[in-house]
Amino acid sequence: MPGRLNTIIIVPHSQARFIKFSFSTRTLIMVGSLLAVSVILSVVAIAYSGNAVGRRADVQRLQAENQELAEVNRDLSRTISEVQARLDDFEERTARLALAAGMQGDVAGPVGATAEGSQVGSGGLYNRLPDGPESLKLQGSWIEQQLDLVDRKLSEKGEILASTPTMAPTVGVLTDGFGTRNDPITGRRAFHRGLDISARRGTPVYAPADGVVVFAGRNGGLGKTIRISHGFGFTTLYGHLHEMNVELGDQVHRGDHIGAIGNTGRSTGSHLHYEVHEEGKAKDPLYFILDRF
């Protein structure tokens, strides 16, 4: 049985003959299907084209971000290099301070350093840390700890120096030194445990270092006597004084006026008998005095 026919008639406005198309339903369905497929393919093509454009935009955006990150990384590398240079400078200065504080053997390299890249500086061999923010933080922390240690050592050295009798206790003429001599009264050979410094009666006597007065009074043949404990094993003694300006327990500092030269006790003339003891043993005071009478 023949298929059903469909007819389309086109009638022009002019007097020309009209145009007539006749086709079956099957043909209409096929043409419609082709048109639908064409539309779908066109939509897919447009969508794909849009996605491609979007992907290109994403690629360009990522490239721009990568360039920015590369610039940031270059800036960070420059900053790390500058910080590393400053830390190296601090490390060298710390080593020098350590040497001044007598810590040659106490300064070690940062924890976490490797043997690779070891260098020799003024403080000796130390291990260089690998470059990077974490290593810089570790190196900075280590330098801070070493500076604290150096500060404590220098402070301790300062206390020792302040307690060492390096200053002459008075101004006068050295008439007798430390060691064996002929006793000026008996004439016999005897050991003299200090210095005799001759000067007018009343000439000021000064503390040669910081300390505490542990004795102030008469002491047999030494007459009026002052003894000062300076700490760190040092004590000093001042004999034959005319005046004593300090009392037992007084704190004194280097340069304080503690008394005056006299002729008390077993003495042949106005002078100061001056002794220095280290760990209980008499030492030659001239060994410690840095300035002159």
Image (cartoon, rainbow, N blue to C red):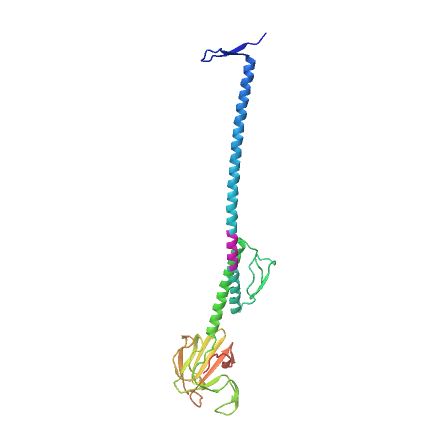
Eyeballing the image, is 221 above or below 71? below
Residue 82 highlighted magenta (yes or no): yes
Picture residue at 50% right of the left edge, 81% below the top: 286
Q: Position of residue 193 (x, y in %)?
A: 50, 83
Name the quarter where the N terminus is drawn: top right
Q: Position of residue 123 (x, y in %)?
A: 56, 66
Q: Which residues are magenta?
A: 75-85
Which residue is farthest bottom? 187
Most prominent secondary structure in the magenta stretch? helix
| Front residue (pair 11, 71) | 11
Name the quarter where the C terminus is drawn: bottom left
| Front residue (pair 163, 84) | 84
What is the count of numbered marks?
0
| Front residue (pair 13, 99) | 13
Q: Position of residue 18 (x, y in %)?
A: 49, 11
| Front residue (pair 49, 160) | 49
Corner quadrant of residue 208: bottom left
Eyeballing the image, is 53 above or below 288? above
Which residue is farthest front? 15
Picture residue at 55% right of the left edge, 12% below the top: 25
Q: Position of residue 35 (x, y in %)?
A: 53, 20
Residue 288 highlighted magenta (yes or no): no
Which residue is farthest top? 1
